[in-house]
Image: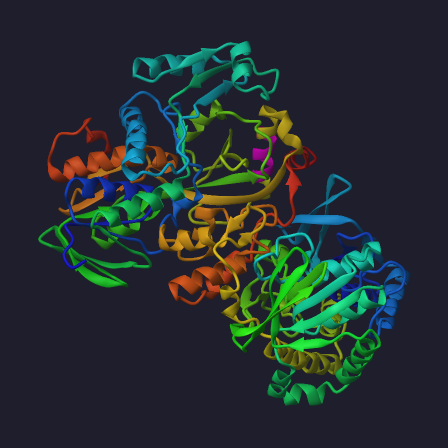
């Protein structure tokens, strides 16, 4: 592609959905990635599309809209990528007060909730530990296979006149008079007035190439994958501690139980969070902790074999909110990054926001809370 | 203490050598008996110079300072300060052992190539046919075709014949003339001729006919197609024949198991034959302090080379002097091992043997067409992305069997050579053997 209208950097789910949304708005879009499609955090994700784990506020507004856009995107692209509104079940092991309070607040914000007594809870999840007697059901929570989704979305972009170039590492962002005019990559130089930085955990490095700044840091997490089993887990089930851990700014390790089945019969178990840079080392202690927590929630899992474990790096922003909007210093450089563990769920919503902002049209919500400028004021 | 992992030729030699100065050795193996895959036996080992096995079994069994931990499956290993902890499952219970030093001698398993029918009953690897015979005394069939490439087919075919099977054919895709590429290796390993003579005599005795430049390219309902192939493994047209057999045992050399060394961070490289192996120094020391590696995981070379590498590793780990003669002997055997790689290459013409419907990943039942679509439709560029889209390599064996073949198929479509990085990444797995979540959880409580 000679002169694209916009270049999206990053072929994960955030970049893919941004490219689709810009393409559908009539732009000629080139997507580039330094690796293959889904080769970063998207390729290490569980495919969470959650509203249940968000506190009331702008992120929840984004999550609710984005969740609906996922189903629209599925229709638009014409492939299922295993998208399923399976629903989430959040259980309280000890005091259920904070969970019930959060659920009430969320319901005022438009989230569908169902507070469950013991009977209802065990009807939803028959294999749950008998001692667990209180929880909340969130029917809007959904799951997809994120790598397939990104691949199908990019394929659609290409079918509609866009282009995708893999193995293209950005070596320079050409900025003139504080505005983007082009980029140099290992696979060619392009003149372009609009760049969308969808490089997730690596978004800070890209901002730096343009002479700007974004405080995105990796927050490492492990996922355990079991052998295929009989259906033991019917929803995405997690411990109410999870919400507190997601919101924690502590660099040290936090673990909380998240258990779910997949279409292929395997069970995925998370979630650990720690900020240790890009250190990819395997920690068997963390695997043991995650296994202990999962089996205490579902004792039936004790006899299920662990086949593999993998890790990924979530793009962490210090205030836990994604960064969506134009760079504070460089015109034409747009960021959509820093979604931490919610990138899959928030991807189409973020894409809609950034497209509306680029085209200068009204959007479904005020994205001011996500503006990159919030960091610029602190650091300039 | 020194932990030796694996009780095949390399591990036995390492344990025996280390015990010579009284060093405490724990020899851990997944089998109930000593010998590994190659010397797996019921009573007495048979085959060429099998007395070597009996000698070393006797020495290891007699050594006071060697403890044999059998039927133990190691699933992980980790560093704890100056010690290395090895976590294993034995009788359904997780245990662990720590030591200052570890020798990894985990050997290799058969390499398989897919072809139509390779996943049907009656099709197996030569290693599987041999270990069923040696381990359980089970003869896998009456009429057997042994095929693939490499000298390992000889002991398998003759062993099965001795046990009463009719070997319909012994088929090697390569030509024996390829040995002419390695005159020096042959001259310096002249004793290997007596091994060849030993097997040729047995083949005459059992009327086993060798065929060269041919391969089993389909197998269904007791009928195998034997196709003539050129040096690139491309099928020569009009030169196929059908052969009846109830079993085809097809193997294409070996793939070392790198899981444990990989978990411990030992550096790896790609060998001349495309196999990923560990980097070791002249004392078999890996890139990681306190960890030595011997045998197939440092380059496929057979039992002779494994014995010497094991001995060197055992001596080095226990701080004993290594005779210069031993090092020269290793050079000689390595030369022969390299000649083996030159003489029995696996060429990528096999990609034409498969059809769109051929299963590539047996665990997850992924067909060849799905791999192709993941590249042409979804943009997969290597075995990892193809795996994410198709699940090839995500099943029980974790890609041990198929990931290399998936890489080659993807590379055939993209026309980009498989990179060393991809080969190395696909050879490493953080969980070396399956462990139940209950066992994993209990391990936490016991610490």
Near-viewer residue (A119 or B368) = B368
Q: Where B110 sits versus A70, above or below? A: below
Left or right, B307 with reference to A341: right
- State the image coordinates of residue A325 (x, y, percent, origin top left): 20, 38
- Residue range of the region highlighted in magenta in the rendering: A286-293
Q: Residue at x 20, y 30 (%)?
A: A367
Measuring from the top left, give residue B360's x and y in whole percent: 54, 54
Q: Residue at x 85, y 71 (%)?
A: B50
Q: How many marks?
A: 0
Q: Is residue B148 left or right of residue A367?
A: right
Position of residue B82 in the picture relative to residue A77 (left or right): right
Image quarter hosting the N terminus of chain A = bottom left
> In the rendered view of the protein, which quadrant contains the C terminus of chain A?
top left
Q: Nearer the viewer, residue B365 or A59?
A: B365
Q: Residue at x 29, y 16 (%)?
A: A109
Residue B6 seen: no
Q: Is residue A131 magenta?
A: no
């Amino acid at each position: 592609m000679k002169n694209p209208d916009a270049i999206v950097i990053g072929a994960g789910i955030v970049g893919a959905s941004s490219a689709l949304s810009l393409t559908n708005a009539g732009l000629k879009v080139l997507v580039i990635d330094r690796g293959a499609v889904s080769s970063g955090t998207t390729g290490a994700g569980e495919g969470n599309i959650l509203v249940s784990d968000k506190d009331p506020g702008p992120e929840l507004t984004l999550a609710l809209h984005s969740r609906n856009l996922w189903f629209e995107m599925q229709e638009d692209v014409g492939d299922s990528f295993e998208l399923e509104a399976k629903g989430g079940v959040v259980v309280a092991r000890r005091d259920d007060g904070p969970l019930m309070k959060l659920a009430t607040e969320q319901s005022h914000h438009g989230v569908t909730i169902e507070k469950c007594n013991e009977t209802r809870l065990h009807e939803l999840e028959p294999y749950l530990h008998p001692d667990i007697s209180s929880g909340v059901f969130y029917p809007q929570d959904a799951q997809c296979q994120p790598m397939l989704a990104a691949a199908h979305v990019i394929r659609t972009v290409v079918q509609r006149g866009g282009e995708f170039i893999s193995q293209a590492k950005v070596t320079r962002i050409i900025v003139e008079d504080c505005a983007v005019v082009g980029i140099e990559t290992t696979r060619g130089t392009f003149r372009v007035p609009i760049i969308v930085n969808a490089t997730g955990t690596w978004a800070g490095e890209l901002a730096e190439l343009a002479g700007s700044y974004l405080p995105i840091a990796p927050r490492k997490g492990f996922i355990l994958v079991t052998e295929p089993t009989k259906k033991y887990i019917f929803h995405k089930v997690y411990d109410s501690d999870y919400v507190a851990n997601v919101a924690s700014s502590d660099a040290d390790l936090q673990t909380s139980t998240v258990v779910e089945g997949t279409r292929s019969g395997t069970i995925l178990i998370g979630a650990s969070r720690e900020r240790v840079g890009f250190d990819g080392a395997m920690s068997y202690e963390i695997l043991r902790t995650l296994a202990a927590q999962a089996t205490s929630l579902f004792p039936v899992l004790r006899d299920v074999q662990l086949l593999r474990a993998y890790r990924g790096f979530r793009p962490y922003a210090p205030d836990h909110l994604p960064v969506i909007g134009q760079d504070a210093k460089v015109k034409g450089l747009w960021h959509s990054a820093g979604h931490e563990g919610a990138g899959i769920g928030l991807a189409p919503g973020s894409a809609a926001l950034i497209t509306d902002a680029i085209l200068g049209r009204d959007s479904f919500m005020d994205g001011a809370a996500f503006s990159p400028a919030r960091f610029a004021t602190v650091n300039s | 203490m020194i932990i030796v992992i694996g009780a095949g030729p390399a591990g036995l030699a390492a344990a025996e050598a280390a015990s010579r100065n009284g060093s405490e050795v724990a020899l851990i193996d997944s089998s109930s008996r000593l010998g590994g895959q190659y010397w797996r036996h019921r009573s007495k080992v048979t085959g060429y110079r099998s007395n070597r096995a009996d000698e070393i079994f006797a020495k290891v069994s007699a050594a006071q300072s060697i403890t044999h931990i059998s039927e133990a499956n190691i699933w992980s290993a980790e560093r704890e300060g100056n010690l290395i902890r090895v976590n294993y499952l034995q009788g359904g219970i997780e245990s662990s052992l720590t030591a200052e030093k570890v020798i990894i001698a985990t050997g290799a398993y058969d390499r398989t190539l897919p072809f139509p029918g390779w996943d049907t009953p009656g099709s197996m690897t030569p290693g599987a046919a041999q270990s069923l015979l040696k381990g359980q005394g089970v003869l896998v069939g009456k009429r057997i075709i042994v095929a693939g490439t490499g000298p390992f087919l000889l002991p398998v075919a003759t062993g099965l014949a001795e046990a009463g099977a009719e070997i319909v054919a012994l088929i090697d895709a390569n030509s024996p003339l390829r040995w002419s590429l390695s005159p020096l290796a042959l001259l310096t390993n002249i004793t290997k001729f007596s091994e060849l003579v030993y097997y040729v005599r047995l083949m005459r005795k059992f009327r086993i006919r060798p065929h060269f430049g041919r391969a089993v390219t389909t197998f269904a309902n007791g009928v195998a197609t034997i196709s003539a192939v050129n040096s690139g493994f491309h099928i020569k047209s009009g030169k196929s024949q059908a052969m009846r057999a109830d079993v085809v045992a097809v193997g294409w050399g070996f793939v070392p198991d790198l899981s444990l060394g990989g978990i411990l961070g030992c550096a790896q490289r790609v060998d001349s034959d495309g196999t990923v192996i560990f980097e070791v120094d002249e004392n078999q020391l890996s890139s990681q302090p306190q960890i030595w590696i011997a045998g197939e995981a440092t380059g496929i070379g057979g039992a002779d080379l494994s014995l010497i590498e094991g001995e060197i590793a055992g001596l080095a780990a226990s701080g004993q002097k290594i005779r210069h003669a031993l090092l020269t002997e290793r050079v000689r055997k390595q030369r022969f091992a390299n000649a083996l790689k030159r003489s029995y290459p696996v060429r990528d013409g096999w990609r034409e043997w498969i059809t769109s419907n051929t299963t590539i990943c047996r665990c997850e039942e992924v067909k060849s067409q799905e791999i192709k679509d993941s590249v042409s439709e979804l943009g997969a560029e290597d075995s990892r992305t193809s795996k994410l889209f198709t699940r090839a390599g995500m099943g029980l064996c974790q890609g041990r069997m198929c990931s290399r073949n998936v890489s080659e198929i993807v590379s055939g479509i993209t026309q980009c050579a498989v990179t060393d990085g991809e080969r190395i990444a696909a050879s490493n797995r953080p969980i070396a053997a399956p462990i139940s979540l209950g066992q994993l959880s209990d391990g936490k409580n016991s610490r």
